[in-house]
Amino acid sequence: HLPLPAVSIALCRVLMDSSDRRAAARVGEESLRVAAKHGSTVTSEYLRLAATVGGIYYELGDLTQATAHLDTFIAIAAQEGLPAGQSALYWNAALVAESRDRQDEAAHLGERALALVSEGDTTRDLGRLRSEVAWLVLRADPSRAPEATAILDRALPALQDFGSPADMATWERVRSLSELLTGEPERAERTARQALDLLSPYPTSETAQVLVTLGDALAAQKRDDDARAQYRAAME
């Protein structure tokens, strides 16, 4: 009685959180094939599943496959006029663009994703999307840090209500970067350390990103030895 794409998205997330990316890719790809076979493709959930698979390719480092996959489904979403599905696809396309060092394009895609859903219900996904858009804005133009801070403020309630510790850690990392760029390195250090506390039970690649941000906050305070220690920890 549950739609296949919704169940598949949940399973893919569990597998991704368990760092089993190959299994997540297999589940996502097979689910897309089965849904297409049964004619269940003109739904937001199907497009969100397609976006999830694109995100898995991104996590696997296959940016060429991720781009081709997402472009195909973005065209389908535009044709069908399904904003929630479009938003999910733009979100992952933004992350791929950022990985290719196309910062302006990444920020533009992220903001398009947010514009499609920002008037909808408060959800975990909306909170996570706002955190990611704030990060992309900071990457593209550090002078927009006050704007990014406002986006983060809007993200916080949804993440406090529905987010995981990892979601909150991502929010803390981006907030730390925003604080650093607005000239508050001491506050940025405290915020980054809070993110590390949240991630301490299950260190991931997010932990490395937080350590880099913490190192930057320490370097801004002229604590170079402490900063180098965080950068070394991130490399490890």
Image (cartoon, rainbow, N blue to C red):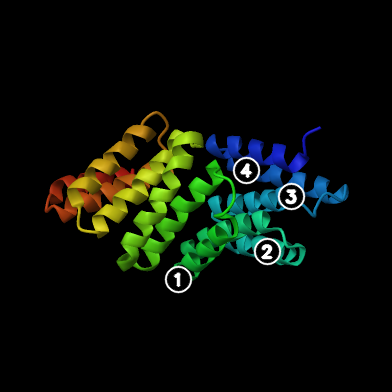
Name the disc covering residue 104, or none: 1
Residues under numbered marks 2 and 4 in contact, where contact means CB atoms less than 8 Å apart:
no
Q: Amino acid at mark 1?
A: Asp
Name the disc covering residue 22, or none: 4
Which residue is at the front of the view, 120 or 138? 120
Mark 2: few/some/many CA within 10 Å (<14, 14-19, 20+): many
The residue that mark 3 highlights is: 46
Residue pictured at 47% horizontal, 61% vertical: 99
Q: Amino acid at mark 2?
A: Ile
Mark pair 3, 1: CA separation: 28 Å
Q: Residue furthest top?
A: 201
Q: Residue furthest left?
A: 222
Q: Amino acid at mark 4?
A: Arg
The residue that mark 2 highlights is: 74
Residue pictured at 88% horizontal, 47% vertical: 38
Residues under numbered marks 3 and 2 in contact, where contact means CB atoms less than 8 Å apart:
no
Mark pair 3, 4: CA separation: 20 Å
Mark closest to the chain's N terminus, 3 or 1: 3
Mark closest to the chain's N terminus, 4 or 1: 4
118 on left or right of 43: left
Image position, residue 63 (x, y; %) = 57, 61
Is residue 23 in view? Answer: no
Mark pair 2, 4: CA separation: 23 Å
